[in-house]
Image (tube, helix red, strand yellow):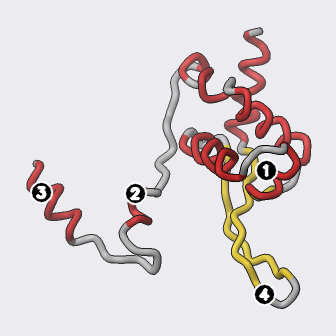
Amino acid sequence: MKNEFLCNFHNLPKSLYGWKTYFHMVIPMAYDNILDVVPILTHPLRLRIIKKLLEEERPMYANELARELDVPRKNISFHLSRLKEYDFVEDELKIKSKDTNPVAVRYYTPTKELRNAMKELKNML
């Protein structure tokens, strides 16, 4: 099985962004019980991110969240990726026109799973 994995790995097609893309693919983590995701949802910074996303009710990007929460963008991006692992946020890549130079920006929105998990967590408390 190990050799089969290595063979398949080396035969992966290269994307525009290179091999690194394959290691950043996110497969949503399933959970059976809300207690399984309490550590994910109750991290202080993640709670602030979740609260902001739910309050705004519009897609937001990492730099925008970082500016509004007064936290480095790197930290915001890390915690957004953790939330995405559990399918609590969705992301969408859009082109944002900044003056004349278009910029690719990843917008994040809360999912129905996040809203349900937060309601479940609130009911537990």
Tell me the residue that label 2 is attached to: 23
Q: Amino acid at mark 4?
A: Asn
Percent across and percent down for residue 43 are: 67, 27
* Residue depth check, mark 3 versus mark 1: number of the one nearer the observer: 1
The residues tagged by marks 4 and 1 sit, at their Cα atoms, a distance apart of 22 Å
Left or right: residue 54 compared with residue 37: right
Give me the residue at 46% from left, 57% from top: 24
Query: In which quadrant of the rendered view does residue 5 lie?
Result: bottom left
- Sequence-wise, the earlier of marks 2 and 4 is 2
The residues tagged by marks 3 and 2 sit, at their Cα atoms, a distance apart of 18 Å
Give me the residue at 69% from left, 47% from top: 76
Percent across and percent down for residue 96 are: 79, 76
User: Do the residues bearing badges 3 and 1 touch, measured as CB atoms within 8 Å?
Assistant: no
Q: Amino acid at mark 2?
A: Phe
The residues tagged by marks 2 and 1 sit, at their Cα atoms, a distance apart of 25 Å
Tell me the residue that label 4 is attached to: 101
Residue 39, relative to residue 54: is it above or below? above
- Sequence-wise, the earlier of marks 2 and 1 is 2
Left or right: residue 20 compared with residue 107: left
Percent across and percent down for residue 3 are: 8, 55
Q: Amino acid at mark 1?
A: Ala
Q: Residue furthest bottom?
A: 100
User: Do the residues bearing badges 2 and 1 touch, measured as CB atoms within 8 Å?
Assistant: no
Tell me the residue that label 1 is attached to: 66
The residues tagged by marks 3 and 1 sit, at their Cα atoms, a distance apart of 43 Å
